Image (tube, rainbow, N blue to C red):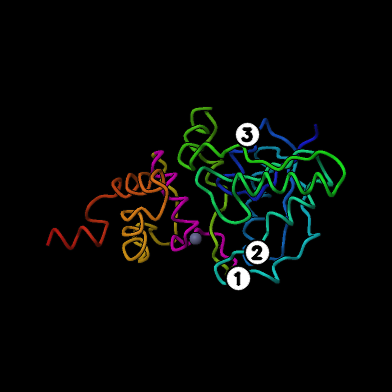
Amino acid sequence: MSEVLLFSAGLDSFPAWHFLGRPPAVYFDLGHRYAAQERHAITALAEVCGIEVAISEELRLGRWEAPDAIIPMRNVHLAMLAVNRADVVWCVGVKGDATLDKSPLAFEDMSSFISRLSGRPVRVDSPFWDMTKTQIISWYLDEGLPVEHLLLTFSCSRTDGDPTHCGTCSSCLRRWISLANNGITAPFEAPPWQWSRVQDYYVPAMREGRYPAHRAEEFFTALATIEPASTPHRRKGIR
Ligand SMILES: [Zn+2]
């Protein structure tokens, strides 16, 4: 069966390209606010790794992008268009992802209704439902793949076109956690562990079980890698 990977040059879809044996990829530029940085990262990764990636501007969903960068039913739109290119569409979700259009159940539903409405069997799936971001990076490193390629990926939702990771968005926080837990120091404009929402929201939310246990464990493991003097929370305790 033919296959295609939905590629965004992010910290999930780049290792997925290796994990799946380097399949053809497609990137949908939706006209969303961080498309420029993603395209910049795609060009860089395609050059150094030889990724066969088609750039498509067929879908201009940026019109529906919410302030938090969510585009409703984004993955449904992408899957419906991607099945014109292949029978198997790899859309990368990771363990614990449970947004309405990105979960094992959502992908099963999509596979079923797109197969029925297109008149042929198609499959929408992720290779990483059983792996966390930290485990994905760990797999990548175990394969002996280069860290510098990993750092060319872009996973930030800043909207000003700057290609530097902001360090103050949830995407940057997740990026930092998975890299820090694998001993990788990555550049951020501001240290993600000092982002105000870490202490104000994430620490209590993780403690109270509002996230899956593995997310909380990896969050606190990453925080523990920071020198006490670097975290405002602990510095207060020392004084
Ligand atoms: Zn960011």
The amino acid type, in three-letter code, at marker 2 is Pro
Residue at x 22% of width, y 55% of height: 229
Q: CA distance from mark 2 to mark 1?
A: 8 Å
Is residue 168 covered in magenta?
yes
Q: Secondary structure at mark 2?
A: loop
Q: CA distance from mark 3 to mark 1?
A: 31 Å
User: Pointer 2 and pointer 1: residues touching (CB < 8 Å)?
Assistant: yes
Question: Residue 18, which numbered label?
Answer: 3
* Image-based side of 21 in relation to 219, left or right: right
x%, y% of residue 62? 69, 68
Disc nearer the start of the sequence (3/2): 3
x%, y% of residue 82? 78, 48
x%, y% of residue 159? 58, 68
Q: Nearer the viewer, residue 38 or 213?
A: 213
Which quadrant holds the N terminus? top right
Q: Secondary structure at mark 3?
A: helix
Which quadrant holds the C terminus? bottom left
The residue range painted magenta reads: 161-182
